[in-house]
Image (cartoon, grey):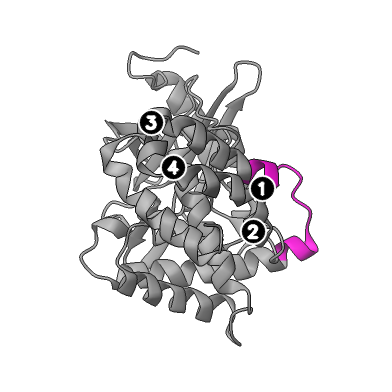
Amino acid sequence: MRFSKHEFPELQFLTKEINNILGENDSGNGQVIILNREPNSLASTFPSEIITCRLSDGSELQLFCKYSAGFSHNSFGHRGDLSYEIDVYRQVLKNLEIPSPMFYGAYQDEAAGEAWIFLQYFEEELHVKASIYHTSMHAAARWLGQFHLEGEAFLRKESIPFLKRHDSNYYCGWADRTSSFANHLHKSYPWLETICKEFREVVYNLLEPSCTIVHGEYYPNNVLYYKDQICPVDWESAAIATGEIDLASLTDNWSEKIRLECISEYQSARWPEGPPAEFERTFKTAQLYWHFRWLGDRPEWTTHENESWRFEEMQQLGEQLGMI
């Protein structure tokens, strides 16, 4: 198999695999024909494109196709590769009733370390962050609460060995790297070293609550709002963890008003009879983790002036959690 300079598979091979996935090879009425391929301008870690196909019955179908193409972004164990995301669709999402993008199938060549995923394409999709209406954020919070409710119930019945499980070493690693990457910023934020060290004393807040299945990067750019329906994408960071970290990522850097409204929507969906007593402390710890998650990923992110607001919020959270 050879890729073009854009890291996309050759047309002939791609056509063959799409026919295999859609079950058209033996239809007797002809095969799927690829009419158009358009690179996804919003692609990040993995190259992706939108493919328009003509099916054997004459109808057209658009697919969102993402390719591993030799790329990887493990991010200190936070993300899996594309094969990991395929397993999330096959073994997790298809077993839950919560809406998610339709998974048509995948191509995997383990020997070559190559994987492709074929998903539903939303022609009129809109990222939650791009919506001018706060209703999209509210809907995203409700979806999240329902997802975590179903995920928690699913884990009580099924074992999912392939899913990553966040533990104290995972969480504390982000705090340790933040402290290391901060370098000269320790002079500007003299409390930073303390809060990074003391995080080990409060991390149990993320371990004691009932675990569920989390998206892992449920920030608005990964959440599509399509015809009043929420459809999260990019599941490479799915894991078993406390659900509040997804809520922290959704509401990160939003106004306090929107944050409180989303918390209310989430709580109503996940705990109709009322949230657990420890929710506020768990959520604040999850917010702190989420700041570490960004600041402890790359040194250039830690010291970038656009991230200075995170240090202000971290100080407030550290004070509220009794860490400083």
Q: What residue would you read off at disc 3?
A: 184
Residue 169: within the magenta? yes
Amino acid type for the residue under numbered disc 3: His
| Residue 17 relative to residue 188: left or right | right
Of tags 1 and 2, the one toward the viewer is 2
The x, y position of residue 244, in whole percent, is 55, 63
Q: Which contiguous range is marked in magenta?
A: 154-171
Q: CA distance from mark 3 to mark 2?
A: 29 Å
Q: What residue would you read off at disc 1?
A: 166
Q: What residue would you read off at disc 4?
A: 294
Number of numbered callouts drawn:
4
Of tags 1 and 4, the one toward the viewer is 4
Q: Quadrant of residue 196?
A: top right
Q: Residues within 10 Å of mark 4 (few under 14, many from 20)?
A: some
Among the two numbered marks 3 and 1 on one chain, the one whose residue lies closer to the N terminus: 1
Q: Residues within 10 Å of mark 3 (few under 14, many from 20)?
A: few
Q: Are marks 1 and 2 in contact (CB under 8 Å)?
A: yes
